[in-house]
Image (spheres, rainbow, N blue to C red):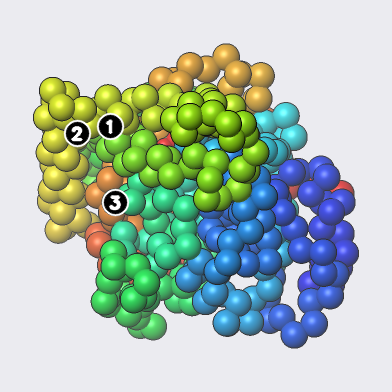
Amino acid sequence: MSADTVLSKLKEINGKYSMFHAMTEDTSADGASFLFSAKDNLTSMDMETCSGSKILIGYRPAFDATSIAKMRAAGGKLIGKTNMDEFGFGTFSTNSGLEVPRNPYDLERACGGSSGGSACAAAVIEDHVSLGVSTGGSICCPASFCGVYGIAPTYGRVSRYGLIDYGNSLDKIGVLSAKATDLKKYMKIIAGKDEKDPTSCVQPEFRTDYRMMKSVAIPKEGTEGLSKDVEAAFKDSVENLVRMGIDVDYVDMPSLKYAMPAYYVLATSEASTNLARYVGMRYGQQEGDLSLKFDDYFTSFRSQYFGDEAKRRILLGTFTRMVGFRDRYYAKALQVRKVVIDDYKRILADHDAVLAPTMPFTAPRFDDISKMSALDSYKADYLTVPANIAGTPHMSVPCGYDSNGMPVGMQFVADHWNEDVLFSMAEDWEKEFDMKAPEVGA
Ligand code: GLN
């Protein structure tokens, strides 16, 4: 499909899958070397940016996020802002205040989250790359549920300028695509130190002669609690890796089971402070009864426009930071974070990557998600959060299909700044893996 055809069919495609909250009106790709989309928590000058929240409806940023600006400068045309969980709070993109994206392999199932719309766009639109954001797994989870490649880089690799913060010490901007070679191609474009984001680093360049992945370590704890189909697809994939000449070891990673609770303490602590700025005065919606006292105005506004999950996280995160509780929760979670990093360093001293399935199950049906408690959904993240609290680069590759034809993904985690071994793995894997694209017809 040519770029012009994609643009002319965009509304029709979106009508079926709901991957975009905002779209370009332009139907000509003249002058663009490639088309891309971006998660709706990255600010863009020409399109509304809502971060999946009703509270930001009407917000038109006055500047582009650095990652979007860099994609445009490289010749990219931004075609849409992708649907997501409100402020990134979720695992299925169903916690959105706006539209919920539908899985390209089965419209009754979720795309994963919170970069669900980005994974959907990467799976459905030919030759398409989408920028996603991961705080605790929001690139790898939807990549796995939608059968595409997704990479979240080392924390600090990509500027967070223009990213609507979820958890400042955790947020990372990365790339999703159906093509393995796109990961390196577009990561090179968006990476780099940026004066506007003090947490972006002077960093090692991606190498052109990167070393190949030779060994992986599978934590025993990472193969527990899997659905039968994920277990079977993962087993076949590991056999495939062995055939490709990769050494596979099974190791202990005791910190893995503590990472999920620690993540939810850290992420909600940071999120609860970040959400304090949305009070109906500066961004997005500003209607309200101005005759109220200021704190009554803020309360009524926030009660009306924040979704349930955002409210839950404000409560949780405020509690974990409170005097009397912060040592027990926040400080403790920081200690766990250090233990997780130490565990990765120990394992990665002898291996190129740590490997496990990306998610313990394949994309669930919407009716099953509605029966899940918040805790059920948090628990589903136990394989994606460890790398995120460690700030280590990680990548999900499609590795099989379940009995309903839904994609399964596996996740490789490399040491800090070692994205190159992930790129090499993705490109080698793509040659081995029999990818079954979804049937797309608008
Ligand atoms: N599911 C995790 C959460 O809800 C991760 C989301 C993310 O990475 N934005 O926090």
Against 126, residue 227 (above or below) is above
What amino acid is found at the position of numbered circle 1 in the picture? Val
Whether the residues at callouts 3 and 1 have beta carbons within 8 Å, the answer is no
Q: Which of 177 and 8 is in front in this view?
A: 8
Whichever of labels 3 and 2 marks the residue nearer the N terminus, that label is 3
Residue marked by disc 3 = 169
Position of 4 relative to 334 (above/below) = below
Mark 3 → mark 2, Cα distance in angstroms: 13 Å
Which residue is label 2 attached to? 330
| Amino acid type at mark 2 | Tyr
| Residue occupied by mark 1 | 265
Q: Residue 79: where, in percent of width, then height?
A: 71, 64
Q: SS at mark 1?
A: helix
Residue nearer the viewer, 86 or 406: 86
Residue 201: which quarter of the image?
bottom left
For marks 2 and 1 on the same chain, the one whose residue lies earlier in the sequence? 1
